[in-house]
Image (spheres, coloured by chain):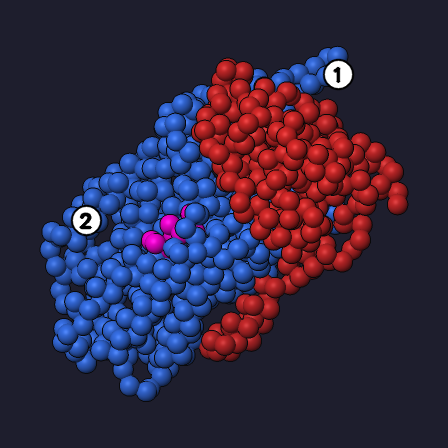
């Protein structure tokens, strides 16, 4: 073995090929089958896609680095299930490009945050977390209420999402900007389109309390309120696992 | 810098800068309403300034032919200075965000100044800015000495270093504007990623061209590690960053992978960024600078071989230990855990080989703070690889994951191992590169050593305590069978440790500032050394040295 190496280390190309070969095996064995083994991701026929407003909110969540302190992955441990809710299933993030499972809980897990608090609570909390949780160390995000949400490129966002495999229809792509506005303005004519395209259960309300302006606060709260609510699969895990 | 380039290289440099300026202009025009446009303008300005620089030196006389008689070290000098600048920036931002976790209002009411945007500036600043520049600079130095061959040209090392720093600047400014892919340690967006691939391929080609000119028949172990660093980082970077931009003219892209596949790809990348960026490259550094400084040969050739191939093979399986008990299939978790535990063998063989090399030189470790930096680095390498294998065991991970213990583990490696070996290598290189007898002040090196060690120990102990307390509080039940503590209870318990951690970080930062001053004074005022000897010159002509020569 050492004799072989004595010869190998005299050849630069041989060394390069050996490194590439040896280093490739682990990834090929562990990652490639995840795309082919069907049981990797459960079936959930009721799984819906993010609305344009929720997707925009998700992008704000990414932009502000929220994932650095909040996980969205409840592990299969008793204390986690009792603290946060049913453990996370792979299917729940199957439309998440990229995933936001996180790696650190400086703040709590928020995989099942949707519907847990009111919109008002979220707005107050984001404006200054210490107003509602005095011990919090979360940054204040006052600037979100001041920032108008950019909607002119939302169609491009949906198109790119479709290209990587999220089933957005042509209708959804064409109306992305209007749907984003409508979802946060329940009395506007655009609101009906949102319910038609994304389902009656979609949250359609003035998330930041001001139906006239569409702010980044609207988008982020809309996203936080849908966390863990895209499918009910996690609440009936046995049924989906049996299939 | 321009005076060292040949006429031909000056022309190529101008063409490259012209193309960059054109691409920058197109980016700026295409991304008028987007951070993408800001980066386009930045690229354009940098390229135009570069063109001015090249044009103003264009008619300088060509470098003399005898430049080929000595190694080309100017890029290494630049890289070391860049590494120290990034160290101060990255550690300053790191300490700032550490204070923010104790006192969240110690910042400005502005988007760029919030924790989430500053944190990647810290991580990328220290890993890619400080670590990356140090790796490139030392790899240039080491590959020339260990092959006894000069780099083939003057332009490509500058392209690699300047291009790499442009990538770092685009990354850091992007985070402040909110440009991020959210993939940890792979945050830069698609256009920065493409640029890094171009730079990296040039780096690889330069390395191979130098190896092809080598006069030593055997490729020294440092070069195996630097090669593995270059090759595997390229592989990881390309696969993990596959994404579809939403439009030309937008910084935003969507990862090709989703959910569980994306998570596994990200942690395959993330853990091996630790392996091949923060371990492999720095082991290359250790294998050159430690024996040189200790004036002892490497203890065991066979241990070098075992640890090198063990690390290259085992590490690539270990990423899934970041996803224990998640929605990742159990078989992948088990593989990751198994290989993580096995990884301890090559890791400790490396650390043992390094420490045994010091046998017969322990009096130098006592007297020479530079060598002591390297010794402590090897010890922390051994400690943190043991801790890593331990934390990868599933039941241990159920406690440690998501807590500050992970942060403590990372910093035991990053401060104790990576930064210590880098400071050791830099303090060894600076007098060699600038032809000085010694560092300006050995006392200041000593001061830096103790600041760095104290900072590391305080940091790591604070995070061990807070992490384990956190993990235990989250899983404690009271007598009636319900959870004993709210999340907020655990947060309150963290406060003293967060303050301690920020103080530890501050000490480490102060050490780096002392180091900068010492290096600056060495370059400016330290007495010159005797002219270089024949030993520090490339071997000329076609003959290949025979072993033992």
Position of residue A121 relative to residue B76, above or below, is above
Q: Which residues are magenta?
A: B35-42
Determine whether the residue tagged by mark 2 lies in a helix, strand or loop.
Answer: helix
Q: Are marks 1 and 2 in contact (CB under 8 Å)?
A: no
Q: Which residue is mark 1?
A: B481
* Mark nearer the N terminus (1 vs 2): 1
**Which chain did the image draw in blue?**
B
Q: Nearer the viewer, residue B265 or A26?
A: B265
Q: Residue at x 54, y 16 (%)?
A: A132
Residue B232 at x, y = what percent? 52, 62
Which of the 4 image quarters holds residue B198?
A: bottom left
Q: Does residue B275 appear in this view? A: no
Furthest residue in direction top, as rendered: B480
Provide the chain ID for the residue under circle 1. B
Q: Which residue is mark 2?
A: B520
Q: Total label count?
A: 2
Task: For label 1, count other residues whose C-alpha is less than 10 Å away and answer few (under 14), some (14-19) or many (20+).
Answer: few
Q: Residue at x 17, y 54 (%)?
A: B523
């Amino acid at each position: 073995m050492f004799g072989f190496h004595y010869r190998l280390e005299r050849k630069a190309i041989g060394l390069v090929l050996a490194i590439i070969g040896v280093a490739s095996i682990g990834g090929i064995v562990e990652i490639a089958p995840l795309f082919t083994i069907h049981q990797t991701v459960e079936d959930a026929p009721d799984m819906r896609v993010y609305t344009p407003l929720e997707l925009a909110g998700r992008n704000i969540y990414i932009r502000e680095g929220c994932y650095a302190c909040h996980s969205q992955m409840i592990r299969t441990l008793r204390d986690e299930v009792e603290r946060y809710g049913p453990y996370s299933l792979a299917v729940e993030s199957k439309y998440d490009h990229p995933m936001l499972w996180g790696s650190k809980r400086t703040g709590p897990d928020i995989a099942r945050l949707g519907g847990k608090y009111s919109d008002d609570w979220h707005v107050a909390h984001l404006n200054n977390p210490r107003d509602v949780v005095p011990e919090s160390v979360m940054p204040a995000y006052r600037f979100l209420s001041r920032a108008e949400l950019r909607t002119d490129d939302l169609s491009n966002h949906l198109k790119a999402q479709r290209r990587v495999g999220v089933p957005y229809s042509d209708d959804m792509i064409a109306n992305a900007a209007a749907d984003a506005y409508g979802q946060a303005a329940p009395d506007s004519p655009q609101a009906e389109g949102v319910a038609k395209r994304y389902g009656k259960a979609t949250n359609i309300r003035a998330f930041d309390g001001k139906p006239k302006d569409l702010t980044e606060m609207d988008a982020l709260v809309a996203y936080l309120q849908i966390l863990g609510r895209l499918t009910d699969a996690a609440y009936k895990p046995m049924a989906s696992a049996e299939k | 810098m321009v005076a060292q380039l040949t006429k031909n290289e000056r022309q190529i440099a101008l063409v490259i800068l012209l193309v960059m300026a054109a691409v920058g202009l197109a980016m700026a025009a295409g991304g008028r309403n987007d951070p993408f446009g800001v980066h386009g303008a930045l690229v354009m300005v940098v390229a135009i300034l570069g063109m001015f620089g090249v044009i103003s030196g264009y008619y300088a006389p060509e470098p003399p032919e005898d430049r080929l008689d000595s190694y080309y070290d100017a890029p290494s000098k630049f890289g070391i200075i860049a590494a120290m600048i990034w160290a101060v920036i990255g550690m300053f931002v790191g300490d700032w965000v550490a204070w923010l976790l104790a006192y969240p209002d110690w910042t400005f009411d502005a988007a760029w100044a919030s924790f989430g945007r500053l944190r990647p500036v810290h991580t990328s600043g220290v890993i890619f800015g400080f670590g990356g520049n140090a790796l490139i600079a030392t790899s240039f130095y080491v590959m020339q000495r260990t092959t006894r061959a000069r780099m083939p040209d003057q332009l490509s090392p500058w392209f690699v270093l300047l291009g790499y720093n442009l990538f770092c600047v685009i990354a850091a400014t992007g985070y402040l504007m909110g440009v991020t892919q959210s993939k940890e340690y792979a945050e830069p967006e698609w256009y920065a990623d493409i640029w890094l691939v171009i730079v990296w391929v040039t780096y690889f080609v330069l390395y191979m061209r130098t190896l092809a000119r080598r006069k030593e028949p055997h490729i020294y172990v440092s070069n195996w590690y630097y090669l593995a660093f270059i090759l595997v980082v390229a592989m990881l970077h390309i696969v993990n960053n596959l994404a579809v931009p939403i439009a030309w003219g937008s910084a935003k892209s969507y990862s090709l992978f989703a959910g569980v596949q994306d998570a596994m790809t990200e942690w395959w990348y993330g853990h091996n960024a630790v392996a091949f960026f923060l371990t492999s490259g720095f082991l290359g550094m250790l294998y050159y600078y430690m024996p040189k400084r200790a004036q002892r040969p490497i203890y065991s050739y066979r241990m070098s071989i075992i640890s090198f191939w063990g690390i290259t093979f085992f590490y690539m399986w270990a990423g899934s230990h970041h996803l224990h008990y998640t929605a990742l299939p159990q078989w992948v978790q088990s593989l990751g855990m198994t290989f993580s535990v096995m990884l301890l063998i090559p890791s400790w063989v490396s650390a043992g080989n390094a420490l045994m090399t010091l046998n017969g030189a322990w009096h130098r470790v006592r007297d020479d703070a530079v060598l002591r930096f390297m010794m402590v680095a090897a010890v922390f390498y051994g400690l943190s690889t043991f801790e890593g294998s331990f934390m990868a065991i599933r039941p241990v991970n159920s406690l440690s994951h998501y807590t500050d213990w992970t942060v403590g583990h990372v910093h035991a490696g990053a401060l104790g191992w990576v930064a210590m070996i880098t400071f050791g290598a830099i303090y060894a290189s600076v007098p060699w590169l600038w032809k000085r007898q010694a560092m300006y002040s050995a006392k200041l090196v000593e001061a830096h050593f103790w600041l760095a060690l104290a900072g590391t120990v305080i940091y790591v102990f604070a995070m061990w305590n807070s992490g384990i307390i956190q993990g235990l509080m989250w899983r404690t039940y009271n007598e009636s069978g319900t959870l004993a503590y709210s999340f907020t209870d655990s947060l309150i318990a963290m406060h003293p440790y967060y303050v301690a951690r920020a103080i530890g970080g501050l000490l480490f930062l102060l050490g780096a500032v002392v180091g900068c001053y010492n290096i600056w004074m060495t370059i400016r005022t330290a007495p010159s050394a005797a002219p270089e000897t024949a030993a520090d010159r490339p071997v000329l002509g076609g003959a290949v040295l025979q072993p033992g020569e």
